[in-house]
Structures are given as structure tokens and as C-alpha cells.
Image (tube, helix red, strand yellow):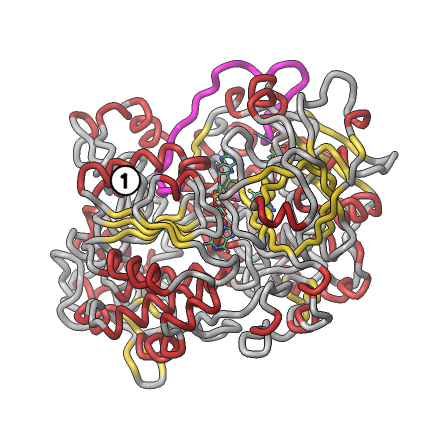
Amino acid sequence: MTNHLGDMQNSKAIIIFGANPASNHPIAMQHILKSKEQNGAKIIVVDPRYTKTAAKSDLYCRIRTGTDIAFLYGMIRLIRDNKWYDKSFIDSRVYGMDEIFKECEEYTPEHVEDVTGCPKEILIQATTAFATADPGCLIWNQGWTQHTVGSSNTRLGSILQLVLGNMGKPGGGTNILRGHDNVQGSTDMGCLSDTLPGYYGLAEGSWKYFASQWKVDYDWLKGRFKSQKMMESKGFSLSLWIHGVLDEANAKNNADTPIKALVCIGNGISTITQTDKVKAALDKLDLVVFIDPYVNDAAVITTRENNLYMLPAASQVECSGTVVNTGRTAQWRSKVIEPLYEARPDEEILFDFAKRMGFYDEYTAGMGKGREFTWPEDATDEIARILKTVGFQGRTAARVKKHTLNWHLFDTTSLKGRGPVSKEYYGLPWPCWTQEHPGSPVLYNVNLPVSQGGMGFRTRFGTERNGVSLLAAQGVAPVGSRIKGGYDEITSKNIEELSGIKLTDEEKKLVEGKNWKTDDSGILVRNALAAGLAPYGNARARTIVWGFRDEIPKHREPLHSFRHDLIKRYPAVADIENHYRTNVRYASEQTAKNWVAEHPINIVSGRVVEHMGTGTETRASKYLSELSGEMYGELHPELAAKLGLKDGEMMWVYGTGEGKIKIKCRYSYRVDKSSVFLPQNFSGVWSGESLESRYPAGTAPHSFGENSNQVTSYGYDQQTSCPETKCSLVRIERA
Ligand SMILES: Nc1nc2c(c(=O)[nH]1)N[C@H]1C(S)=C(S)[C@@H](COP(=O)(O)OP(=O)(O)OC[C@H]3O[C@@H](n4cnc5c(=O)[nH]c(N)nc54)[C@H](O)[C@@H]3O)O[C@H]1N2
Ligand SMILES: Nc1nc2c(c(=O)[nH]1)N[C@H]1C(S)=C(S)[C@@H](COP(=O)(O)OP(=O)(O)OC[C@H]3O[C@@H](n4cnc5c(=O)[nH]c(N)nc54)[C@H](O)[C@@H]3O)O[C@H]1N2
Ligand SMILES: [Mo]
């Protein structure tokens, strides 16, 4: 998220793609509605389903799932032809816009209508309203990410904001409404299989940096892996691990061994595509451990009888520490009660694991005091010390606590504080470069000094490509910058020249061989800020990502496309070998057969307001179960009539894989005549059979339903491997 939730009150138009904040982000929705009331901001919703958010919009654009790229290029083409783009922003701060303007050529309004199903008049109205508002903010969420081209969706959305010069401005930006509590925090912490914490990569240099920060020997760390090569290879991802268990062919990507054991903290595993494969993988493993305050949903899906452990975890009110929200702001959470019964906080369970496996001292050494550390304060300070890439240095436990205690003194629209927290922004949104830095509520804003939250784009991919500069043009730099244009990231080699500040011999020794990401002394960052420079440089945003499968975003039909006739023109990428240690099918799956002939109904997948995730927590509430107690599929009455289904009758839904679910038909005009909406919040029924008896006595939730992912199709993002849970085909029959 480049901006933050309250900042949406500064917007003059808001376009929402694949998000339904009225149900899923009610706080964000309040800010959106305020921008409408206070600024007359036009709200535009692009979604295959007429959601509660759409009901509050000024303009609703219904599109076919998986066609957002065509829609966006249609917008960009209209912006190009009407000269609504921000020429000076593009000329001075963007690299590669010509390629985008070329790619949009084929997306005429007529062609966009054919590909997306959205009438061309609506596309033109949406583009006109959004492109002529200054500033406009763009929101996306899971409707964009759960696709084979999800990463391209998110890139092209950001590019649209670059085209319009909406980046780096209050009221503009790309605002991604994230998911679980602290999901931004867990990404920052490297709960991903292809980064170390703070988005440091997996290369030897990063591991060596972490070894020194964690105060362990690099060779010891290396010894934990089968080889250095495996240490530096991306791991299995959450969506693909099942293939590491079930498909022997993937063993060769994993140091010649299939996965043998699984420790699952929270969930995520019963909510990926093709849940039947998850069950098969859980059944096959040697050992399965769940760490969860509730009986984990997946624990009930497996029928294994041995080596399945459930360790009761404490919930959030029984723990303390920082959480980070979608706008990059940190908040201190205090323990309300001691953990009940045998529940233990997650970290205690992990510490015990480390003790029994013999590396507890190494595990905790980074907190600096051996066995004597204070939890969680010392961990928070360790994070602040190490995660320099995203500017965590100023986010110590003491400062975060002070903000949370004084939260009433902060303005919700600007995040600015008053009184004892004046000159600081709520929650110290990163980057927060030093102990004195106020945090940065709006990324890439050059209208502020770096010391007050300003910055340009990051110099991340070199300073030139094919003879063309990747640095910001002359005249574009944060207010008060000594350098009046672009510059490289700060290193010990260029600090004196760029900042104009001479280092003492002692300082030189301290920073030798270091850069802004690795310098523990803080000298490089301090001097950069003193000269008004962003430690990470001042570059152009790039539209082209060299090394990606699609260097610029391209529309590609879903693997199980509703429009088989478009597959030739917009084919999936070639199959990928060793994609997060898995051999993944793309083109071969897409062309394996004419999927839509046998599975003619499109899934639109999303959430209900009453339940969270699998519903493990919320279906345990009597009251929420009373409000929303059963799984269903929404069908347009005309489609239902064709299938011979009355409102309230049961139907079988068959996926393109092995899975099938028996659910209630609910008539609805929210969906179009070829789709079924399946909420993702139910579980505990398996192809018509209740799993209630598998819960230990007294632990079953109050309501159950079929899991929609039994019928979602095979498919994973071509870059990130996120499952394609938002594009699937099914066949429906009266039960
Ligand atoms: N009440 C409630 N709130 C929640 C959650 C919950 O389960 N319940 N979950 C939390 C979590 S983990 C997350 S990640 C967020 C998710 O928040 P959202 O992303 O808002 O959640 P969804 O309802 O899954 O999907 C959003 C919209 O995407 C649309 N959509 C589907 N396919 C496409 C497509 O191809 N293109 C476009 N443009 N739209 C599409 C759906 O119709 C839906 O309206 O919500 C969080 N908040
Ligand atoms: N078809 C379809 N599938 C989807 C989606 C979709 O839109 N459509 N959305 C996807 C998305 S974005 C998500 S996030 C997932 C849903 O997200 P999941 O994570 O798969 O489902 P949840 O039910 O939210 O699981 C959270 C678990 O964490 C446990 N928990 C809560 N607090 C703690 C704690 O402090 N410690 C520990 N150890 N555990 C705790 C809860 O009891 C629960 O079991 O679904 C994904 N799958
Ligand atoms: Mo999520």
C-alpha cells in the first residue's frame, strides 16, 4: 500500500478492482464513503459480482473474471488518445512507458467489450471519471491476485497510476486492502519462501548479513541446509507444497527428497485450490503438526490416524507485541489475559522446538542477551536493527508503544500527531529511517524532505539499461535534496560525493564495504538524510521487469477459460520447471481439453461479512452461525431455471479436478447468467458428508459447509505461485 486508509479521504476519485470493502474491510469503507461525501469523489467498482461495495458506487463495471488486464489496457488506451496522461511525471519519473502505450493499441473499447464483457460505454465513462480526477486512488485486493496473471494485474494497476501521475501524492497511490490481521507484518518479516526478513534475497551476501545480525556463524547456518545451493533456492510455496509431497518428480527440485513433515502455524492450507489434493498430501506425510487456538480446519480434513499433533496456541488477546496494518503502520498490542488452559503463545512453542532440536541459543542470540532477553520488546528492537531495507530502524518497541498509548492524539486523515507525538506519523509507517524520523505515510512523495517522510522511487535495478538512464530526471528530487535529480543508492563509496559531507577516518573504517542496507553504524543513513537524500537512491519507476515471464504485463486467458476461442490469441505461458521447487503446468493445462465444454459455469469467488477465512474462528460463534449458517452458491435465476433448480434446492457442483460439493442454490441478481458465486468461508462438509464427528469432543463449530476449494481448478500465478482461486470452471446438476 503506497498510501494509507485515512488518506483515501483526500481522493477525488476511487477505482476499486476485485475488492469488496463493504463486507471485508469495513473501516476502509468508511474512509471511502467519506471521500464521496466530502469531496464528491466518484466511486468506480470493477467486479464480476454486484457486491455491497458496488451498491454504494457511482459506476459499476461488470467484467468476466481474469480479464482485468484487458480492461486496464482499454483505460490506458483511452487516456493515451485523449492525452489525459501526466506527461511531465512520465518523462521525469518513469522508465518504459512507450512499451505500455504500444501494448494498449489493440485494446479498443470494442475489443475490451468482447474480452471482458463490459459494455464499451461503461469503460469510457469509468476512464473519463477516473482520469480527469486529481488525485485518484486505485484499490485492489484478492480479485486481482488469485490468478495465473495476478502479479501482472498488480503491476498494470500501478502503471495506470504512473500514467496519470497519481503516485507519490496524498489522495492517490495504490491502496491494497490486505487480508489477515498483521498480514503486512508477516510479509515484512519474511514469511515467504523466496526472501529473508525485510525482503532481503537469498543470495550468499544476504545470508552472511543475517548470520552477523543473528550473531551466529555463517557456516553453522549453512550447515542447517543440505547444500549451499538449497540454501539459496526459493522454497516450496504455501500453494505448491502439496506437489512436493504427492509428485515424486518434484523431489529433484528439493535436494532429491519429497517433503516428509509439515508444521502448520495458523492455516492457509485448506484454502488453496483442489483441497482433495491437500487431503491426500496430509494423509501421506510422516508427521503433521498444527499450532492453532482452534482445531485447525485441515486437521479434520485428513483421515490419518497417527503422527498428527494439535498444539493449542494462545490467541491475540493472550499475547503482546507489534502488529503491522495494511498501511505499513505498527501498533503495540497488549496482553489482556493470561493464556487459558494449556494454550501457549506461538513463540513459546517455537522456542521449545528450538530447544529440543538443539539450537535454542543460536535461535535467540540475535536479541543480544542470550537467555536473558525480554519478550517481545527485544525481538521488536532486533527487527528494527536488522530490517534496514524497508527502513525499520526507527521502529523500536518504546516508540511503537508510545504511539499506541497516544493514538487519540493522531489525525486519522493525515496520520499526524499532536502534543507529545507532534511531528510524527501514527504507527511510524515505514520507511522510518532513524530514531528521530517521523515515518512515511505516503510513499514516493517528493514534496516533502526525506527527513519528514519524503522520497523518490528506489534505485533498485541499476542506474541505466541499454544506454537509457533509470535515474529520476534533473529537477525531480525530494524537497531540500542536495542532489537535484536522480542518484544511486547510498554506499560507503559514494556517500561523501553525494552528501557533500566528509567522513572522519574512524567513520570511514566503520562503513567500509557497507551500503545503506548493511551499515550498522547508521552513518550512511544519517548523512544521507542530512543532505536531503533518500538512502535507497532516487530513480524512475519501471514498467518493464527484465527477467519476468512477461516483461510488461500481458493479458493471458485463465488456464480454465470461459472463452476457449480466445486461448490462441492470449495463451498461458509455457509450463514452468522448478517454480518454487514444483514443475507447474500452464500452456499444457490450458490446452489439455476444451474445459468449458464440460464445465460451462464460471466461479466467482469471494467472502461473506459474517465469517473469516475458513470460518474456523467465526463458525465457532453461535451468533455468527445464526446469521450465516450454511454454504450456498448464488445463481442468476435464468441460469438456475436452465439447470432446473428452484431457489433453496440442493445442487452438486463438479470442479475440473476430482472435487465435488453439494450446496444450496440461492437465487441472486448479483451474478451474471453464466456464473456461480461461491463464498470461501465454509468448511467441515466433504462432498456431501459431514466431518463433525472428526472434531474432538466439544470443539466442533456451530455451523458447517462445503469448502469451495474442493471445486476450484488447478492453476498458480506465473511469478508468485499464488493459487488461481478466482478463476475456475464448474458443472452444476440438481442434487
Ligand atoms: N468478513 C470478512 N472479512 C475479511 C475476510 C473474511 O474472510 N471475511 N478475509 C480477510 C482476508 S484474509 C482478505 S485477503 C481480504 C480479502 O478481501 P477482498 O479481496 O475484498 O475479498 P473477496 O471477497 O475474496 O474478493 C473481492 C472481490 O473480488 C471479486 N473478483 C473475483 N474475481 C475477480 C476478477 O477476476 N477480477 C475482479 N476485478 N474482481 C474479481 C469478487 O467478486 C469479490 O467481490 O478480506 C479480509 N477481510
Ligand atoms: N476460493 C477461494 N479461496 C481462497 C480465497 C478466496 O478468495 N477464494 N482467499 C484466500 C485468502 S486471501 C486467504 S488469507 C485464505 C484464508 O485464510 P486461512 O489462513 O487459510 O484461513 P483462516 O480460517 O483465516 O485460518 C487462520 C487460522 O489461524 C488460527 N489462528 C488465529 N490466531 C492465531 C494465533 O495467534 N496463533 C496461531 N498459531 N493460530 C492462530 C485460526 O484459528 C485459524 O485456524 O483463503 C484463500 N483461499
Ligand atoms: Mo487473505
The disc labelled 1 sits on which kind of residue? Gln
Looking at this rendering, what residue extends furthest in the right direction? Answer: 305
**Residue range (magenta):** 324-346
Up the image or down, 620 lies above or below 93; here it is: above
Q: Is residue 415 visible?
A: yes
Q: Position of residue 369 (x, y in %)?
A: 50, 33
Residue 382 forms part of the magenta stretch: no
Reading the image, the residue beneath label 1 is: 435
Secondary structure type for disc 1: loop
Q: Position of residue 165 (x, y in %)?
A: 23, 62
Residue at 39% x, 41% y is 53
Which quadrant is the C terminus positioned in?
top right
Residue 331 forms part of the magenta stretch: yes
Q: Is residue 360 visible?
A: no
Residue at 46% x, 74% y is 551
Q: Provide the major secondary structure of the magenta segment.
A: loop
Q: Nearer the viewer, residue 679 or 432?
A: 679
Up the image or down, 501 lies above or below 98; here it is: above
Residue at 42% x, 68% y is 112
Q: Quadrant of residue 476?
A: bottom left
Up the image or down, 31 lies above or below 626; here it is: below
Q: Horizontal placement of 258 versus 591: left or right?
A: right
Q: Nearer the viewer, residue 335 or 557?
A: 557
Q: Position of residue 387 (x, y in %)?
A: 42, 48
Q: Position of residue 385 (x, y in %)?
A: 40, 44
Looking at this rendering, what residue extends furthest in the bottom direction? Answer: 467
